Amino acid sequence: MRISNIIIAVLFSVQSLAQSTLDTYLSSVRVNNELLAAAREY
């Protein structure tokens, strides 16, 4: 019982870490795309 709780906790923290990493990556990609679009307008 205790071991499965630990496994579940680890899985949840890995999932949330992956989610925040993905969010950071996506927002940096979005910023880069906006910068490229702004650079093209000049």
Image: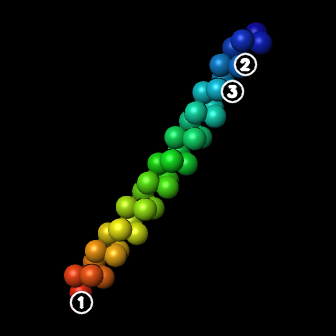
Q: Secondary structure at mark 2?
A: helix
Q: Which residue is mark 1?
A: 42
Q: CA distance from mark 1 to mark 2?
A: 56 Å
Q: Is residue 25 above or below residue 32?
A: above
Q: Which residue is mark 3?
A: 9
Residue 41 percent across, percent down from the top left: 24, 87
Q: Earlier in the sequence, mark 1 or mark 3?
A: 3
Label ID, residue 5: 2
Q: CA distance from mark 3 to mark 2?
A: 6 Å
Residue type indicated by callout 2: Asn
Q: Is residue 13 above or below residue 27?
A: above
Q: Quadrant of residue 9?
A: top right
Q: Residue at x 40, y 69 (%)?
A: 31
Residue type indicated by callout 1: Tyr
Q: CA distance from mark 1 to mark 3?
A: 50 Å
For the residues labelled 3 and 2, say whether their Cβ atoms are less than 8 Å apart: yes
Q: Residue at x 53, y 44 (%)?
A: 19
Comparing marks 1 and 2, which lies closer to the viewer?
1
In this picture, residue 41 sits left or right of residue 3: left
